[in-house]
């Protein structure tokens, strides 16, 4: 099943986890630490207060405001993901956000991938056509699909594994950003 189809079929929790996972993997671009979004992840668990989402989102935004604005296109896309996150975790609002985060995260990975990317846009890869997609973008696509499949197949029991998938992606992106910074300085 394509990423677009998975997003279309996901429930509110799966959509929130999908958007949050995309944002979480891009936190290194915003200067945030690895624990920055952990409270938002916890708010997706069974028994958590769904109305806490907006307040937790404001806290995360406040912590990242101190890092200022970065003129880098990839960082700008990541910041927009955070700014666009809906204050209320309704299915309609998180569906739009999750879809936008999916596109933005793939674009970020495309911008940061030093390998040649023959694909014209991320839209084709989201629809399931991955020929010509660079390795970093293809890996991000796999992570997005994995998060949605984990939540669809396991409900809240899939949250821990979805967070692990996101953490792995964040480490990869942090390494790419670090390498890129060293190349620009050297």
Image (tube, rainbow, N blue to C red):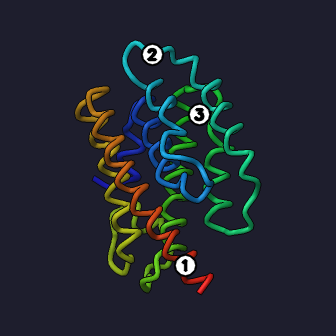
How packed mark 1 is, by other alpha carbons closer than 10 Å (few <14, some 14-19, many 20 or more), is few
Quadrant holding the C terminus: bottom right
Q: Is residue 164 above or below residue 74?
A: above
Extreme residue in the front direction: 186
| Residue 70 screen position, x and y as percent | 72, 62
Disc 3 is placed on an element classified as: helix
Question: Counting residues from the N terminus, which is met first, the one under dot 2 or under dot 1?
Answer: 2
Question: Counting residues from the N terminus, which is met first, the one under dot 3 or under dot 1?
Answer: 3
Q: Nearer the viewer, mark 2 or mark 1?
A: 1
Which residue: 57% across, 42% down? Answer: 96
Residues tagged 2 and 1 counted as in contact (Cβ below 8 A): no
Which residue: 46% across, 76% down? Answer: 113
Question: Counting residues from the N terminus, which is met first, the one under dot 3 or under dot 2?
Answer: 2
Residue 93's disc is: 3
Residue 130's disc is: none
Q: Nearer the viewer, residue 9 or 140?
A: 140
Q: Is residue 148 above or below residue 43?
A: below
Disc 1 is placed on an element classified as: helix
Which residue: 46% across, 53% down? Answer: 25
Q: Nearer the viewer, mark 3 or mark 2?
A: 2
Real-space CA distance between mark 3 and mark 1, rounded to the nearest whole angstrom: 39 Å
Q: Nearer the viewer, mark 3 or mark 1?
A: 1
| Residue 98 screen position, x and y as percent | 51, 44
| Residue 68 screen position, x and y as percent | 76, 53
Residue 48's disc is: 2
User: In the drawing, does residue 184 fall left or right of residue 8?
Assistant: right
Which residue: 52% across, 73% down? Answer: 112
Real-space CA distance between mark 3 and mark 2, rounded to the nearest whole angstrom: 19 Å
Dividing the picture into quadrants, the one containing residue 29 is bottom right
User: In the drawing, does residue 170 fall left or right of residue 80?
Assistant: left
Disc 2 is placed on an element classified as: loop
Residue 182's disc is: 1
């Amino acid at each position: 099943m394509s990423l677009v189809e998975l997003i279309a079929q996901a429930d509110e929790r799966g959509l929130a986890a999908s958007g949050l996972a995309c944002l979480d993997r891009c936190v290194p671009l915003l200067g945030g630490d690895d624990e920055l979004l952990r409270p938002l992840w916890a708010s997706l668990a069974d028994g958590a207060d769904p109305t806490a989402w907006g307040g937790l989102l404001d806290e995360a935004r406040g912590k990242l405001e101190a890092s200022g604005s970065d003129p880098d296109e990839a960082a700008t896309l990541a910041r927009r993901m955070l700014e666009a996150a809906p204050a209320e975790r309704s299915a309609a609002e998180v569906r739009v956000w999750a879809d936008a985060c999916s596109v933005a995260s793939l674009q970020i990975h495309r911008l940061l991938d030093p390998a040649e990317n023959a694909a014209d846009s991320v839209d084709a890869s989201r629809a399931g056509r991955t020929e010509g997609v660079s390795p970093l973008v293809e890996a991000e696509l796999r992570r997005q699909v994995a998060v949605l499949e984990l939540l669809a197949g396991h409900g809240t029991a899939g949250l821990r594994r979805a967070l692990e998938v996101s953490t792995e992606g964040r480490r990869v992106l942090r390494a790419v950003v670090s390498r890129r910074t060293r190349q620009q300085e050297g």
